[in-house]
Amino acid sequence: MSTAPDPLSANVRRGPSGEAKPNAIDETPWGWLAVYVEFLGEPVKGLKLKFYSEGMALLNFPGAETNDQGIYVAGRILVGRYLCQIEGQKRLARITPVENKEKPFCIVLPVGRPYFDIAVDAKFDTFRNNP
């Protein structure tokens, strides 16, 4: 009998006494609750944040506030949809956990604003029928 550790031991579902259950991989998905808040392409620091589950239950992250880079990382959380209340905003931002805490979920202020703007200097007279 081999005593080599299971290479996927961190992902193998365990029974009540700790024995590995063959062919039963724990698929509980986890991600990082991490957000980056910006306004006009610039990070916004010092904003107080509150996080809610989709059922509007408040998640307990006391002192949640964006740092100098506009980032707040709460920690690991089950993958799902969450809501973020940002100081001074009337609407809640819908967010999801990210795989890498170094690449947080981007929230553009005001909440509801598109992620990018398109500035076009169009000359509509070019479309006229000029004889």
Image (cartoon, rainbow, N blue to C red):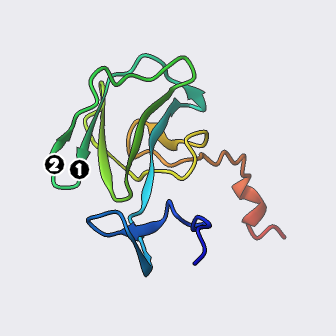
Q: Position of residue 88 (x, y in %)?
A: 29, 25
Residue 16's tag is: none
Query: From the viewer's perspective, is 131 left or right of 25?
Result: right
In the image, is residue 36 above or below residue 3? above
Place residue 78 in its image quadrant.
bottom left
Q: Nearer the viewer, residue 90 or 24?
A: 24
Q: Nearer the viewer, residue 28 or 118?
A: 28
Q: CA distance from mark 1 to mark 2?
A: 5 Å
Tell me the quadrant of the picture where the N terminus can be found.
bottom right
Query: From the viewer's perspective, is 39 left or right of 63?
Result: right
Q: Position of residue 67 (x, y in %)?
A: 49, 19
In the image, is residue 22 above or below residue 81? below
Mark 1: which secondary structure? strand
What residue lies at 70% left-to-right and 57% top-to-bottom? 124
Three-letter code for the amino acid on which mark 1 is drawn:
Ser
Query: From the viewer's perspective, is 61 left or right of 65?
Result: left
Near mark 1 (Cα within 10 A), the count class, few <14, some 14-19 or many ≥20, is some
Mark 2: which secondary structure? loop
What residue lies at 38% left-to-right and 41% top-to-bottom? 111
What residue did someone put label 2 on? 56
What residue lies at 26% left-to-right and 65% top-to-bottom? 16
Query: From the viewer's perspective, is 71 left or right of 125?
Result: left
Three-letter code for the amino acid on which mark 2 is drawn:
Met
Circle 1/circle 2 CB separation < 8 Å: yes
In the image, is residue 129 above or below residue 119? below
Q: Position of residue 21 (x, y in %)?
A: 39, 77
What residue did someone put label 1 on? 53
